[in-house]
Image (cartoon, rainbow, N blue to C red):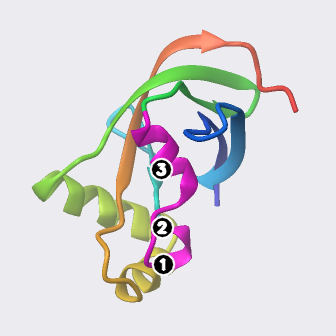
Amino acid sequence: TTCLLLRTTGRKTGHARILPLIYGDTGGEVVIVASKGGADIHPAWYLNMQGGGEVAFQIGGQAFECSWREPDGTEHDEVWAFMEKLYPPYKVYRAGTKRKIPLIMMKATKAIDSFKA
């Protein structure tokens, strides 16, 4: 399974947070899933994104600032099916929670330096 690094800004602390996430690439956009392993609450990184801070991702040695969006309707269903094919446990995660698991579609807007620890 392919992973990227996602960097968000903590909505409470203002500190940069970097974590690895499974991703897919469809239609020129990078897709990540806010599954939190099927938990009934959203992951902190998703809440941080909603908080409006900077969002960036890194794949291999290339890092980018990005814009992001959440697909809805038919597009959400199609992207969800695509992500389930990439990582079949997503199907179990979705069945195990009452919340609609968000999908995030990111588009690189500017190349930046690779993330530093």
Q: Which residue is mark 2?
A: 35
The quarter of the image holding the N terminus is: bottom right
Q: Residue at x 59, y 41 (%)?
A: 12
The answer to whether residue 45 is magenta is yes
Q: Which residue is mark 1?
A: 38
Q: Which residues are magenta?
A: 35-51
- Residue type indicated by callout 2: Ser
Say whether marks 1 and 3 touch (CB < 8 Å).
Answer: no
Q: Residue at x 36, y 87 (%)?
A: 95
Mark 1 or 3, nearer chain start: 1
Residue 79 falls in image quadrant:
bottom left
The quarter of the image holding the C terminus is: top right
Q: Which residue is mark 3?
A: 46
Say whether marks 1 and 2 touch (CB < 8 Å).
Answer: yes
Q: Nearer the viewer, residue 96 or 27?
A: 96
Q: Nearer the viewer, residue 15 or 104?
A: 15
The answer to whether residue 11 is magenta is no
Q: Residue at x 37, y 41 (%)?
A: 105
Dot in front, 2 or 3: 3
Q: CA distance from mark 1 to mark 3?
A: 14 Å
Q: Is residue 92 above or below residue 48?
A: below
Please indicate whether residue 74 sits to the left or right of residue 65 in the image: left
Q: CA distance from mark 1 to mark 2?
A: 5 Å
